[in-house]
């Protein structure tokens, strides 16, 4: 009639083998659920670590971009400063040349005046 007695002589509707398989399946399912929960915890912590690493990488990337931009800015400033100094050097060279010509002219004038003075003194 589909009724069975188990090892404790209790009346059961399922066959003992089916009941044992059902119990074993239940235990396996519990173990599977426990392992799945543990896996989800591990995956969750892994995702957190990956997110933290991604944030750190993004932060370092931004720092690198900022440093690169700063270096470009410094380079441009130095180029502008170099151009200013080159212009100042050119200006000073021109001024030196003017002073040299003026000095040579004054030396000529001095020589002419000394010659005139010497001639004037000898005439007296």
Image: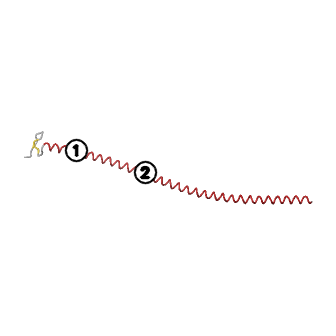
Total count of labels: 2
Q: Quadrant of residue 111?
A: bottom right
Regarding mark 1 in the picture, which secondary structure is present there?
helix
Which residue is painted at 12% across and 41% down in the image?
6
Decide if residue 32 is on the left or right side of residue 122: left
Residue 82: x and y, percent? Answer: 61, 56
Residue 19 position, x and y percent, is 15, 44
In the picture provided, is 41 more to the left or to the right than 63?
A: left
Determine which residue is flagged by label 1: 28
Mark 2, residue position = 57
- Residue 8 appears at what percent x and percent y? 12, 39
- Residue 36 in percent (x, y) is at 27, 47
- Give the residue displayed 77% in from the left and 58% down from the top: 104
Q: Residue furthest top?
A: 7
Answer above or below: position of 72 versus 37: below
Q: Which element is circle 2 on?
A: helix
Of residues 53 and 99, the one nearer the viewer is 99
Of 44 and 99, nearer the camera is 99
Q: Quadrant of the C terminus?
A: bottom right
Q: Which tag, 2 or 1, sits closer to the chain's start? A: 1
Q: CA distance from mark 2 to mark 1?
A: 42 Å
Q: Residue at x 43, y 51 (%)?
A: 57
Q: 10 Å neighbourhood of mark 2: few (<14), some, or many (≥20)? A: few
């Amino acid at each position: 009639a589909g009724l069975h007695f188990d090892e404790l002589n209790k009346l059961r509707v399922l066959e003992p083998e089916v009941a044992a398989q059902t119990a074993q399946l239940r235990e396996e399912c519990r173990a599977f659920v426990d392992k799945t929960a543990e896996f989800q915890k591990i995956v969750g912590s892994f995702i957190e670590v990956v997110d933290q690493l991604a944030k750190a990488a993004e932060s370092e990337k931004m720092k690198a971009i900022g440093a690169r931009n700063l270096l470009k800015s410094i380079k441009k400033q130095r180029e502008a400063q170099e151009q200013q100094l080159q212009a100042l050097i050119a200006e000073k060279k021109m001024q030196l040349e003017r002073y040299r010509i003026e000095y040579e002219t004054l030396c000529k004038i001095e020589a002419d005046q000394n010659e005139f003075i010497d001639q004037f003194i000898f005439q007296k």
